[in-house]
């Protein structure tokens, strides 16, 4: 079943390329496959048994046993959550690009290939084909930025490609070393070995090159680099603002909503289970990196003039909370049972934050796309003013999204951030305290945006700006509705991931 | 006076006699009956008689008896029969090529000289008597000098003949001196007796001188460096058919007798290990120098014939390797190599002869030949690639056989340096052969050059030779069977 | 029946030469190539693993102990399949040749016949005969139909491609001269002067003999395989050659050299790889020397490709780099490394074909320039998007992305090298990184260049059907093997474990 889900978008992309000679045909096929993907992923959600430990829907085929490469896929709560998020965001992105004349058949095909890459990454359990999908999602993204992006797209796309590539190579090398030491690429197997302590032994025995103790940390930092670039973690984030700004806003929805989650997914699925001792060992530097990722981009967002850059930095900031949550959860892996509740809280918060930030950020960029379409590409903070009087519905809905991003209780941003802080304060008080600064700063710059763009004197330039059309309102409705639903009833998600989180806390792994 | 049977002499020399008779007949006919006829007719009739004579000789050789005359004046073995058949075949081919040439009005003399030279060669390969060797050799040489200078209208022809004659005379002198030393040191003019007389661990210094002298004499004949200086001029100046004849038949005979003299006559003196005096190091040096000089000089040539001449010197070097190894395998290889080389060389000169009428001599004149004469071009491709040693042509197998047998000679692999040098030079040779083929196939000639018409007889002959080269390359066993591994 | 691949090719060559029209010559050539490939496929279908299929064995020159012995094991069959694929693709990409068409296909098919012969020969002498038969057609193909460098016109151009052709022919011939010397030496010492492989693998040659004949033969073949520093003919020759010839040269003919290294040098003279007992410049055996040269080739080839201005030279040098992997794999002397080497032979054959097809047929034939600087402003991605797509996929395959055939091949080589030559693995890794860099540089410069909007896009003829068919064929092959490498690994591994390779004493699967 998972294989079907993963191959469906590839098939869709090929069909778009072959049959999508007109724009209408292309987007129709793309939408068809997008919706089918969403329905399938929701079926997974429904079929997932939250109380069952371990991976479900697994498929396993031998491919090249002498090289430790098998086709092993499966999904647990985390996996299904990511699948649904990806499918949902692709549908939103397609709806956002529906009316954009510049985007033709190649664009839709590339989006579908990207979706396949995402599906594959979130379900693969053997490094080799996980890596294939990881890279596979990089290439359509590169082209999406390169071809349809803004004026500085070449440089942005190159930077994006290079940074991610360097990170990927570090990741690859780390796993090659793991393979050479243990003979397996399987995530579950490696996690088991790490948990039982066997991994350290094997590393020491089979990689004679390095001094015994240095191997583990070296591999850990190498793998960390790969995910740190993707998430991104400060200071490896410098590719992101340019890329998000130059990419077409419809693509940025996907970039921020789904692709950035690949980094956090990597932390959860790969780094945490396989390198728990190293994470504990390096807790201090990791926490400070998380804090930096929360605070510094928030400062940066404050001073941006370009709305897309503002929200780009805001994205980094929100993902910083996820990183904080992950680090905190790692701290207690396997010890202090009385703090299990805090660990569970942190992890659940991370998962919630993943989903809700994906939703929120994507919606925000959707709004920016709509705005750009009305202004002919202008999106500077200073360019507007008093839009609330000119396009009230637009501002109202966008305001909801901004408040969700802010973390207003009642909207989807709040539960995630709350749970993360609930879990992290007892375990990393200093770091958490400093991170609160991030919350404050986020509030400041978001409110500034509202003030400068929505409120204030009406900018006569936009007197004739049309409000949201009915189609757009209908399209946006599910996103906004979800924000409220998840804000009031986060059990929707927590219920599904509960089993996974518990297993993590109990077993220290998968 | 040693008594011997004239009947035996007759029966043993019947093939030679046949050819000689054919030659005289041809001469007579041409000088009397056909005096007034057109050149084509005279050539045609003469060729007919010549071919008939040679074919008759070949048939006789099939059934000819073996035997030896006293004093080793004639030593007829199956191997000599094979070589003689090869020489006759080459003569036939030469004659057929000559029917298209228009260099002279003295048709009868020309063809007769070819036949007499063939007779000389047939004697040369059948004898192991020093005196008879010298006589036959001089007979051959004189015929070849005249054939070289036959084109009276051409100054290069005369110059070539003179150079050839002067060189030849001098080297004949050396050879005679060497032979007289051998006689003096051994008391006999028969090769086997000479060999037997030189047992013993030490080598007489006079014998060494004799070896060197003989090497000089024969070295000249086979155009080995540094006695090769006549060859480029002779090949370039002589009429094409004569040059082809020199390059093919006389090479076969000369190498055969050279090998014979050295292996039969001086084996004891031949020393099993390099470093001890003997003819092996002498010939090895000769071989190495020939290979290097021949191939490197050929690179710089702009005339096709000079290029072929220098390449002949290079090939002489490879063939000398076969003699240096002096095992039965390597001598078989030598004979195979020289026969197939002769075919390819004769073919190449045949092509040039067909193009002579168009005034093509320099390399640049060959440009665009593939368009003007596709059949000729293809034949030239076969001949040159065989000379370069590209499979599946005969030249390749010859090279492999010689090198492999040289390495297999006991003690094994002692000649490895010589073989490595030969292989390296062989690689170099591809460069200049490809240069010629580049002109023929790649370069575009003048736009409006007309197609070249070639006579039927030369054309068929060329295809036959080309076919032989390919056949002997794909199935060398056909020839090896006759040469036999003794 | 497999012998008919050779005979049909010769007959086809004759038929093409004598064919009255150009169209008929093209069709005849394609049919011949197709027939050859079909024969190999039929053999594959009937194959039992580990079998040695004796096709013909008759005494050829009994006086010398040489036999006409054709046979195929798994390795041969893999390469026969490659030849068939490359032949067909090459003919499809040469469909547009108008100058002396019949002669072109005649030379081409003679070359193919020679290549088939080498892969089928099981007698050393016969192998050498076919090896040399292949040299002359190469010369003429380049000298007559080659392409000129971008800054040469008329007379100058002709001289430059003749130079490239002559260099290639002479290097090949020099290499084969070395092999001839070695072969003559082997013949001299072989019992009964029998040169068939089975007899030679059982004959035990003295160690001292093997120690100097092995490098002679290996070097002779390695020249044709493009081993550094004897590789200089390759970029020049490939760049000057017409597309089909480049595809065949880089794709198949270089593999003749590598095959010779494996089949002749290593299989018949394994003692040459043993340690010398003393050290010179840090090397203790020929194995060390050639392994280091291979790795230098990997890095050097990639690095030089990075700075080339000529598109075809980029690909030519990338071929040198990829062949370095083959040679490294051969020197690992482990089952996994050798399996990787043979797989890389197949994989690179297909990939090089794709790359040259794009550079030569699709780009150069239309734009008449190979200079990256001149191609950049043409915005070729918009003019010939199919070519861009093919090059992207070929580039992905070339850098060894999982899913394409190159990954499993290079991965196996690296794993094999890690066990026995671990110091070289990081260097090879660097080579891969540089490979990514130059592929990406070439891609962006050729297809995704930028031009001021007032520069019009060139009007180029569209991609023709034969080109599309050829591209699809090659892409399908690399994907099939990439996704299901067992299809070839099941041929190669049993062949490597047959008694013929006993002398190498290969390690087990891990």
Image (cartoon, coloured by chain):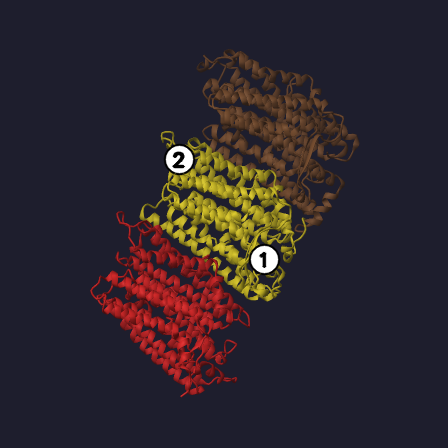
Chain colours: A brown, B red, C yellow
- The foreground one among B208 and B104 is B104
- The quarter of the displayed image where residue B248 is located: bottom left
Chain on which label 1 sits? C
- Answer yes or no: are tags 1 and 2 on the same subunit: yes
Residue A413 on image: x %, y %: 64, 21
Please indicate whether residue B331 sits to the left or right of residue A288 in the image. Answer: left
Work out whether residue B432 can be spotted. Answer: yes
Q: Which mark is residue C197?
A: 1
Distance of mark 1 from mark 2, alpha carbons?
55 Å
- The quarter of the displayed image where residue C453 is located: top left
**Residue linked to disc 2:** C377
Residue A83 on image: x %, y %: 64, 26
- The foreground one among C469 and B62 is B62
Residue B252 on image: x %, y %: 40, 69
Q: Is residue C460 above or below residue B312?
A: above
Which mark is nearer the camera, 1 or 2? 1
């Amino acid at each position: 079943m998972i294989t079907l889900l993963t191959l469906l978008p590839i098939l869709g992309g090929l069909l778009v390329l072959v049959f999508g000679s007109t724009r209408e045909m292309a987007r129709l096929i793309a939408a068809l496959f997008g919706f089918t993907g969403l329905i399938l992923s929701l079926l997974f959600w429904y079929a997932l048994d939250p109380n069952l430990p371990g991976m479900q829907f697994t498929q396993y085929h031998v491919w090249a046993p002498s090289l430790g490469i098998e086709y092993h896929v499966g999904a647990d709560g985390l996996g299904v959550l990511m699948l649904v998020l990806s499918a949902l965001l692709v549908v939103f992105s397609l709806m956002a690009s529906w009316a954009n004349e510049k985007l033709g058949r190649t664009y839709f095909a590339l989006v579908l290939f990207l979706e396949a890459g995402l599906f594959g990454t979130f379900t693969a359990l053997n490094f080799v084909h996980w890596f294939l999908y990881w890279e596979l999602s990089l290439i359509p993204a590169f082209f999406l930025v390169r071809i349809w992006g803004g004026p500085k797209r070449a440089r942005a796309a190159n930077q994006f490609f290079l940074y991610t590539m360097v990170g990927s190579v570090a990741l690859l090398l780390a796993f090659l070393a793991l393979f050479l030491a243990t003979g397996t690429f399987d995530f579950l197997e490696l996690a088991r070995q790490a948990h039982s302590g066997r991994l350290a032994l094997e590393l020491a025995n089979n990689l004679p090159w390095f001094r015994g103790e240095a191997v583990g940390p070296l591999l850990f930092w190498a793998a960390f680099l790969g995910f740190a670039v993707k998430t991104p973690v400060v200071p490896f984030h410098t590719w992101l603002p340019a890329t998000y700004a130059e990419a077409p806003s419809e693509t940025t929805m996907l970039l921020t909503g789904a692709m950035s989650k690949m980094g956090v997914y990597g932390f959860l699925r790969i780094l945490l289970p396989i390198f728990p001792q190293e994470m504990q060992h390096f807790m201090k530097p990791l926490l400070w990196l998380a804090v930096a990722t929360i605070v510094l981009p928030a400062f940066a967002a404050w001073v941006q003039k370009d709305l897309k850059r503002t929200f780009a930095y805001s994205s980094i900031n929100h993902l910083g909370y996820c990183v904080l949550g992950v680090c905190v959860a790692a701290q207690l892996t396997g010890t202090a049972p009385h703090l299990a509740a805090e660990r569970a809280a942190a992890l659940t918060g991370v998962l919630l934050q993943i989903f809700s930030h994906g939703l929120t950020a994507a919606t925000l960029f959707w709004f920016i796309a709509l705005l750009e379409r009305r202004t002919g590409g202008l999106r500077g903070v200073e360019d507007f003013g008093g839009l609330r009087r000119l396009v009230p519905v637009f501002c109202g809905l966008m305001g909801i999204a901004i408040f969700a991003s802010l973390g207003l209780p009642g909207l989807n941003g709040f539960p995630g951030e709350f749970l993360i802080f609930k879990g992290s304060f007892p375990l990393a008080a200093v770091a958490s305290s400093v991170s609160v600064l991030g919350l404050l700063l986020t509030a400041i710059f978001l409110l500034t945006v509202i003030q400068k763009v929505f409120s204030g004197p009406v900018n006569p330039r936009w007197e004739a700006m049309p409000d949201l059309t009915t189609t757009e309102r209908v399209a946006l409705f599910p996103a906004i509705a979800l924000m409220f639903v998840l804000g009031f009833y986060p059990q929707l998600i927590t219920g599904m991931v509960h089993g996974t989180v518990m297993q993590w806390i109990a077993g220290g792994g998968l | 006076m040693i008594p011997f049977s004239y009947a035996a002499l007759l029966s043993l020399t019947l093939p030679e006699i046949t050819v000689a008779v054919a030659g005289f007949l041809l001469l007579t006919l041409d000088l009397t009956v056909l005096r007034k006829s057109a050149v084509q007719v005279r050539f045609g009739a003469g060729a007919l008689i010549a071919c008939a004579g040679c074919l008759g000789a070949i048939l006789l050789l099939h059934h000819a008896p073996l035997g030896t005359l006293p004093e080793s004046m004639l030593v007829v073995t199956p191997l000599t029969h094979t070589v003689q058949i090869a020489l006759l075949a080459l003569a036939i081919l030469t004659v057929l090529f000559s029917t298209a040439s228009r260099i002279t009005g003295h048709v009868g003399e020309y063809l007769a000289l070819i036949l007499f030279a063939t007779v000389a060669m047939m004697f040369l390969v059948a004898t192991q008597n020093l005196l008879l060797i010298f006589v036959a050799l001089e007979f051959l040489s004189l015929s070849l000098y005249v054939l070289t200078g036959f084109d009276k209208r051409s100054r290069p022809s005369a110059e070539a003949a003179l150079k050839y004659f002067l060189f030849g005379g001098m080297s004949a002198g050396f050879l005679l001196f060497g032979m007289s030393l051998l006689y003096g040191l051994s008391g006999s003019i028969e090769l086997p007796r000479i060999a037997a007389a030189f047992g013993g661990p030490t080598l007489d210094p006079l014998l060494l001188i004799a070896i060197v002298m003989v090497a000089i004499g024969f070295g000249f004949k086979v155009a080995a460096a540094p006695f090769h200086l006549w060859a480029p001029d002779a090949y370039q100046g002589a009429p094409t058919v004569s040059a082809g004849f020199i390059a093919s038949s006389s090479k076969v005979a000369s190498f055969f007798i050279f090998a014979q003299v050295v292996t039969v006559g001086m084996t004891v003196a031949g020393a099993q290990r390099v470093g001890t005096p003997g003819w092996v190091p002498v010939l090895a040096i000769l071989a190495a120098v020939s290979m290097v000089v021949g191939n490197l000089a050929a690179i710089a040539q702009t005339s096709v014939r000079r290029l072929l001449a220098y390449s002949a010197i290079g090939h002489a070097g490879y063939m000398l390797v076969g003699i240096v190894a002096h095992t039965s395998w390597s001598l078989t290889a030598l004979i195979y190599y020289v026969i197939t080389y002769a075919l390819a060389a004769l073919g190449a000169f045949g092509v040039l002869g067909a193009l002579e009428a168009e005034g093509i001599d320099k390399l640049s004149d060959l440009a665009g030949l593939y368009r003007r004469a596709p059949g000729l071009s293809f034949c030239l491709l076969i001949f040159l690639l065989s000379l370069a040693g590209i499979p599946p042509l005969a030249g390749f197998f010859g090279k492999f056989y010689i090198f492999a047998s040289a390495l297999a000679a006991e003690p094994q692999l002692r000649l490895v340096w010589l073989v490595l040098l030969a292989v390296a030079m062989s690689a170099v040779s591809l460069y200049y052969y490809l240069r010629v083929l580049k002109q023929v196939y790649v370069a575009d000639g003048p736009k409006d050059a007309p197609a070249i018409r070639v006579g039927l007889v030369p054309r068929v002959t060329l295809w036959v030779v080309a076919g032989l080269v390919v056949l002997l390359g794909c199935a060398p066993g056909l020839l090896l069977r006759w040469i036999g591994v003794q | 029946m497999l012998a008919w691949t050779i005979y049909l090719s010769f007959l086809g060559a004759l038929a093409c030469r004598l064919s009255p029209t150009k169209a008929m010559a093209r069709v005849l050539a394609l049919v011949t190539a197709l027939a050859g490939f079909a024969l190999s496929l039929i053999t594959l279908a009937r194959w039992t693993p580990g079998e040695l299929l004796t096709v013909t064995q008759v005494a050829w020159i009994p006086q010398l102990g040489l036999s006409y012995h054709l046979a195929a094991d798994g390795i041969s069959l893999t390469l026969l399949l490659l030849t068939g694929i490359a032949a067909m693709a090459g003919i499809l990409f040469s469909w547009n040749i108008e100058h002396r068409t019949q002669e072109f296909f005649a030379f081409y098919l003679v070359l193919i016949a020679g290549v088939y012969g080498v892969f089928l020969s099981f007698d050393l002498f016969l192998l050498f005969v076919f090896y040399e038969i292949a040299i002359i057609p190469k010369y003429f193909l380049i000298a007559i139909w080659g392409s000129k460098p971008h800054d040469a016109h008329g007379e100058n151009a002709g001289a430059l491609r003749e130079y490239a052709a002559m260099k290639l022919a002479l290097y090949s011939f020099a290499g084969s001269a070395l092999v001839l010397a070695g072969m003559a030496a082997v013949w001299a010492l072989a019992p009964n002067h029998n040169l068939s492989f089975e007899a030679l693998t059982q004959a035990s040659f003295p160690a001292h003999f093997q120690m100097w004949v092995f490098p002679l033969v290996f070097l002779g073949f390695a020249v044709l395989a493009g081993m550094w520093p004897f590789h200089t003919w390759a970029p020049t020759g490939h760049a000057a050659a017409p597309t089909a010839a480049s595809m065949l040269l880089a794709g198949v003919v270089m593999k003749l050299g590598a095959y010779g290294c494996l089949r002749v040098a290593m299989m018949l003279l394994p003692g040459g790889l043993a340690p010398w007992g003393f050290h010179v410049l840090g090397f203790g055996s020929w194995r060390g020397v050639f392994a280091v040269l291979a790795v230098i080739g990997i890095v050097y080839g990639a690095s030089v490709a990075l700075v080339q201005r000529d598109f075809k030279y980029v690909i030519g040098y990338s071929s040198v780099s990829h062949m370095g992997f083959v040679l490294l794999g051969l020197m690992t002397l482990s089952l996994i490394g050798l399996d990787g080497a043979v797989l890389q032979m197949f994989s690179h054959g297909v990939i090089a074909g794709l790359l040259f097809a794009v550079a030569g047929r699709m780009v150069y034939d239309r734009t008449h320039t190979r200079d990256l600087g001149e191609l950049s402003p043409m915005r070729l991605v918009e003019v010939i998007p199919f070519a861009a797509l093919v090059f992207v996929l070929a580039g992905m395959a070339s850098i060894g992305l999982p899913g394409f055939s190159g990954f499993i091949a290079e991965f196996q080589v690296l794993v094999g090298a890690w066990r026995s030559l671990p110091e070289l693995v990081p260097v090879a890794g660097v080579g891969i990184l540089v490979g990514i860099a130059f592929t990406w540089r070439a891609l962006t410069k050729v297809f995704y260049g930028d031009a001021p909007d007032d520069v019009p896009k060139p009007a180029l003829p569209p991609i023709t059907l034969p080109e599309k068919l050829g591209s699809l064929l090659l892409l399908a092959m690399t994907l099939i093997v990439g996704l299901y490498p067992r299809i070839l690994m099941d041929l190669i591994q049993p062949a490597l474990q047959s008694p013929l390779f006993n002398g190498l004493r290969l390690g087990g699967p891990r």
